[in-house]
Image: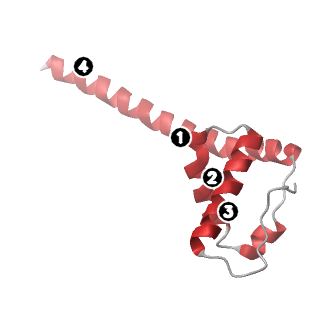
Amino acid sequence: MEFMWVLHFKHAVSISDRISGQEAMVLAYINESEIPFSRVAGIIALAKELSTDTAALQRLSMDRTTASYKTVYGLGLTLRERLTEKLKFLEKICCLNDHLKLTSNLF
């Protein structure tokens, strides 16, 4: 996806002007995508993290179908498994707690 508002500088530009340009790009993307302003900090943090590996970032691409599949069967499955493990652990703790209550009432 190519955006019309990508800035290209051909001469030396101050850091404050470059930051302002990047802010404008983020805000334009936020508005075009109808993303809430509360997500801006997270998007900027994501951009910073992604920019640490430029080789992978240059090759990164994902369409809607792939994103949906990976979310449901990749990330979603992993999160579901972790949640199940935590719930089983909590169930054991609750059962132990109930057992302790019963045995303490006997004495």
For the residues carrying marks 1 and 4, which lies nearer the camera in this image? 1
Residue designated by label 3: 21
> In front: mark 3 or mark 2?
3
Q: Which residue is mark 4?
A: 102
CA–CA distance between discs 3 and 2?
16 Å
Mark 3 and mark 4 in contact? Answer it, CB < 8 Å: no
Vertical placement of 22 versus 99: above or below?
Answer: below
Residue at image point 30% right, 28% down = 97
Q: Which residue lies under the disc numbered 2?
A: 43
70 or 83, which lies in front?
70
Residue extending furthest left?
107
User: Residue 25's spot in the image, x, y percent?
Assistant: 71, 56
* Callout 4 touching callout 2 (CB < 8 Å): no
Report whether 30 appears left or right of 6: left
Number of the front mark, 1 or 2:
2
Q: Amino acid at mark 3?
A: Gly
Q: SS at mark 3?
A: helix
Element at badge 4?
helix
Tell which circle, 1 or 4, labels the residue nearer the N-terminal end: 1
Tag 2 or tag 3, which sits nearer the N-term?
3
Report the Cα–Cα distance between label 3 and label 1. 46 Å
- Residue under label 1: 85
Q: Is residue 1 left or right of residue 39?
A: right
- Using a 10 Å C-alpha cutoff, classify the residue at mark 4 as few (fewer than 14 neighbours), some (14 to 19) or many (20 or more): few
Which element is circle 2 on?
A: helix
Kindly identify the amino acid type of the residue bearing the numbered disc 1: Glu
Give the mark nearest the N terminus, 3 or 4.
3
- C-alpha gap between disc 1 and disc 4: 26 Å
Amino acid at circle 2: Ile
